[in-house]
Image (cartoon, rainbow, N blue to C red):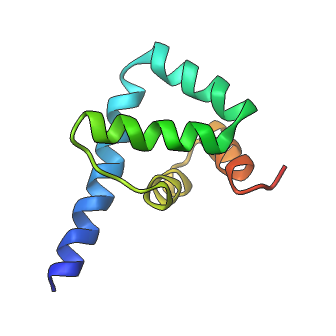
Amino acid sequence: MPELISDAAQTGNAAALYGHISSDSELTQALFRQALQDPNGALERIVAIGEQVGLSVTGDEVKAHIASLDDSASKLWLLKARGGL
């Protein structure tokens, strides 16, 4: 059972981190521009931002959260991050 709680907390962290980043339009744009050129670097930066603000996430958790969104721009970045382009 503790593992399920941990997984739920991590999923919540990814959503909270996405909300934190989305609330800062300058950061959002900078990350999107980076993601277009270096998707893995952008993912590493997102994970690092999470650590800085106390929302620990893994790259896979970030990808899973973005995949769950109904946002074509985010999904395009996710496709690139997975090596699809």
Relative image position of residue 27 (x, y in whole percent): 46, 20
- Left/right placement of residue 7 relative to residue 59 reads left
User: Residue at the left extreme?
Assistant: 2
Work out whether 11 lies above or below 28. below
**Quarter assignment of residue 16:** top left
- Residue found 55% across the figure and 48% down from its top: 70
Quadrant position of residue 72: top right
Please state if 26 lies on the left or on the right of 72 as rendered.
Answer: left
Q: Quadrant of the N terminus?
A: bottom left
Image mark count: 0
Q: Residue furthest right?
A: 85
Q: Residue furthest bottom?
A: 1
Judge from the rendering whether residue 7 lies leftward or rightward of residue 74; answer left or right: left
Q: Is residue 31 left or right of residue 18?
A: right
Where is residue 82 drawn, in percent x and y? 70, 57
Residue 46: image quadrant is top left
Residue depicted at x 56% and y 20%: 30
18, above or below 5, in the image: above
- Please tell me which residue is depicted at 52% across the width and 50% down the height of the picture: 66
Q: Position of residue 75 (x, y in %)?
A: 64, 47
Q: Residue shown at 66%/23% (left/top)?
A: 33
> Percent from the top left, x then y, of residue 55?
26, 45
Q: Is residue 79 above or below residue 54?
A: below
Task: Please tell me which residue lies in front, 15 or 42.
Answer: 42
